[in-house]
Each structure stands twice: as structure tokens, then as C-alpha cells.
């Protein structure tokens, strides 16, 4: 087993490699796209700045990257960061917002009403994540002696950096939301209205954000081209995507993972989800391991998957089949 355990890679080397690319969608909207190798495993973020307030939609699960983002925001923003929006509760969207809460203490956290109800569990998830980092550091120190002598000093320095970061991050807390969203809600960032809408689709507590007079939709993981359906509500999710697809005002969709999309491109995730649902409906007694090879090749081929995509597709398909069966 490699010395660089997965969590330590996240903790040390990943922060040196991982960086989002900034894309200006409109003068007010900046899309922070996760690098391609991490597109299924860490989230995009979106910054919106009106004349009086700024808003950040989601945050990376890599705290070191969020710290870098906070530095950039302090240099870049012309207005206060008033709002932090979590599209849903998954770690790679919500937990990094604790870093931004510490750096921008006046910013109000906005979540779905369901997420607000279960927020104690989200706070525990932050503690669990940091506990996992600590255990990984301890394990890596134990393995240090097995490394080539010329590598030990390098890894010792990296582990010391990881310890310093962990010590700093132990001071973080995920502060309770100031605003929970039970129904479509309009906010004004200063001559720049936005609408936040709750759904139960990718999870039981999703938020989307409509901006630029309805032409741009921040869709979170609901609109991912290759969606993770392991916590999804299939019937509602499919109906949500169909409704978004029919929106004639909408031109640009910013997903939680991957590149910007058009409404027409929602046909692919729709087909993925519908196919999973159809397979479990037509073969309710067939186990998941027997259903996986039956997934239509022509659907998978449309994704034109690279190595990272192949791994994600296999994992997402299995999780979706299991979830679809459970939701019967």
C-alpha cells in the first residue's frame, strides 16, 4: 500500500495540485470550475456580486483550497460577502463553508429547510472529517520509517504541515444557518435580484439559484451531466430536470460538478436517471450485480468517458441502482 494514504493526499499534496479555474459568466457571476481530475469528487463554486452584496454558492471540500479562496475574495470583492449558500448537505459542498464563516463572520448561511432541521448531523460531519484527517496523519507517521531514507525528510515536512493545518481547522465550527428555505425566496444583492428554490431531487434538501433575470441557473448536483444518484428521489428528480429543461428563459446552467451546460444538455442526465429507474421497475427482483451489466451501452457511450469518468460511472451506476430499489 502506498505511503501517501488517500486522506493525506487530500491533506497535503492535493492542496498543491488542486485549483479551480475562474470563468466569467456575466459581469456579476464568476464560475469557479473544479479541475478535470477532481470533477466528480470535489465541487464547483459560484460567486455572485451585486452592487451591495456578494454571495458564494457552495465551497470545496478541500479546506486548504477554501483558505486560498478566502484570500482571493478579500482582494477581489468590492462589496461585503453577505451570503453563503449550500446547495445541499454533501461534504464537498457544505463543510468548506465553515472556513468562509470563520473568514467572513457576518455572512449568513442559507440552506434548505430539511438541512436546517438536521443541522446537528452536518456539524458532526465536520468533526468526523477532521477526526479522519488526524487518524490518517497518525497512520502516515507510523509508515514513515518504511520509506526510503532520502524521502523521509520530505514526508516529515509534509506531515508537519498537515498537523499545523489540522490544529488550525480544529478551531472551525459550522455555525447554524441564518436562513432556511422552505419555498422559492427572492433576495436582492443590490439592484441584482436572485431567486433560491428548494427541491427534493439529488438529496432531500437541494437548493438552486436563479440569476441574471432567470437566464443563469446555479443547479448544484441536481443538474450534473453524470449525476450521483445514491441519495436521490428519482421521480421528483426527473420531474425537476424536465421542468428546468422546458424553461425558455434559461440559457446557462452551472452544475455542482463539471462544465457549464445548456438546458438541452440535460437530456443526458435525464436518460441516465430514467434508465436506472426503468431497469429496477422492470426487474424488481434482480440483484444489483446482475443489473449492472445490462445497463444500455449506447447510454454509457454518450458520456465519452476518460479513466476518471469510467470509475465514477461504475460507482454512480451501482449507487443509483441500489437507491432506486430502496425507494420502491
Image (cartoon, rainbow, N blue to C red):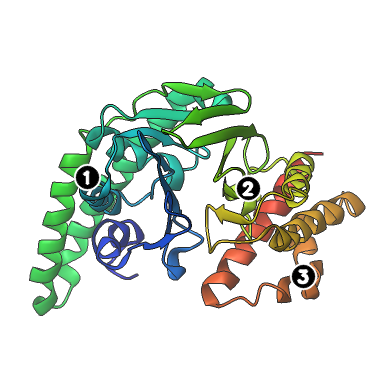
Nearest to N terminus: mark 3 or mark 2: 2
Residue at figure coordinates x 41%, y 66% from the top left: 35
Left or right: where 157 falls relative to 281 = left
- Image location of residue 237, percent across then percent down: 72, 44
Which labelled disc corresponds to residue 299? 3
Furthest residue in direction right, as rendered? 282
The residue at which mark 1 appears reads as 74
Comparing labels 3 and 1, the label whose residue is closer to the camera: 1
Left or right: where 280 falls relative to 256 = right
Nearest to N terminus: mark 3 or mark 1: 1
Residue at figure coordinates x 27%, y 68% from the top left: 3
Helix, strand or loop for disc 2: helix
The residue at which mark 2 appears reads as 222
Comparing labels 3 and 2, the label whose residue is closer to the camera: 2
Residue at figure coordinates x 41%, y 21% from the top left: 178
Disc 2 packing (10 Å; few <14; some 14–19; many ≥20): many
Nearest to N terminus: mark 1 or mark 2: 1
- Image location of residue 210, percent across then percent down: 58, 41
Between the residue at mark 3 and the residue at mark 2, the CA separation in whole angstroms equals 19 Å
Contact flag, marks 3 and 1 (Cβ < 8 Å)? no
Left or right: where 126 falls relative to 197 = left
Amino acid at each position: 500500500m502506498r505511503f501517501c494514504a488517500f486522506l493525506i493526499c487530500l491533506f497535503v499534496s492535493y492542496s498543491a495540485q488542486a485549483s479551480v479555474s475562474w470563468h466569467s459568466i456575466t459581469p456579476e457571476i464568476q464560475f469557479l470550475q473544479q479541475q478535470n481530475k477532481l470533477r466528480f469528487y470535489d465541487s464547483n463554486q459560484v460567486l455572485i456580486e451585486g452592487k451591495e452584496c456578494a454571495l458564494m454558492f457552495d465551497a470545496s471540500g478541500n479546506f486548504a483550497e477554501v483558505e486560498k479562496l478566502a484570500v482571493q475574495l478579500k482582494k477581489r470583492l468590492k462589496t461585503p460577502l453577505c451570503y453563503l449558500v449550500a446547495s445541499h448537505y454533501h461534504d464537498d459542498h457544505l463543510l468548506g463553508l465553515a472556513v468562509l464563516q470563520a473568514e467572513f463572520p457576518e455572512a449568513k448561511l442559507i440552506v434548505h429547510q430539511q438541512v436546517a432541521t438536521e443541522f446537528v448531523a452536518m456539524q458532526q460531519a465536520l468533526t468526523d472529517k477532521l477526526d479522519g484527517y488526524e487518524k490518517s496523519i497518525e497512520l502516515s507517521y507510523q509508515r514513515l520509517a518504511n520509506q526510503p531514507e532520502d524521502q523521509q525528510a520530505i514526508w516529515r515536512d509534509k506531515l508537519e504541515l498537515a498537523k499545523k493545518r489540522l490544529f488550525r481547522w480544529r478551531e472551525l465550527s459550522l455555525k447554524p444557518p441564518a436562513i432556511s428555505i422552505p419555498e422559492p425566496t427572492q433576495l436582492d444583492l443590490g439592484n441584482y435580484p436572485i431567486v433560491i428554490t428548494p427541491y427534493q431531487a439529488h438529496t432531500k434538501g437541494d437548493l438552486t439559484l436563479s440569476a441574471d433575470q432567470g437566464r443563469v441557473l446555479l443547479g448544484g448536483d441536481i443538474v450534473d451531466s453524470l449525476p450521483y444518484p445514491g441519495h436521490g428521489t428519482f421521480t421528483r428528480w426527473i420531474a425537476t430536470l424536465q421542468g428546468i429543461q422546458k424553461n425558455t428563459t434559461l440559457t446557462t446552467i452551472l452544475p455542482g460538478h463539471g462544465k457549464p451546460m445548456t438546458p438541452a444538455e440535460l437530456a443526458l442526465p435525464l436518460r441516465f436517471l430514467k434508465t436506472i429507474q426503468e431497469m429496477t421497475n422492470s426487474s424488481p427482483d434482480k440483484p444489483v450485480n446482475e443489473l449492472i451489466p445490462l445497463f444500455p451501452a449506447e447510454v454509457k457511450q454518450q458520456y465519452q468517458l476518460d479513466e476518471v469518468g469510467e470509475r465514477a460511472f461504475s460507482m454512480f451506476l451501482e449507487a443509483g441502482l441500489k437507491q432506486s430499489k430502496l425507494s420502491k
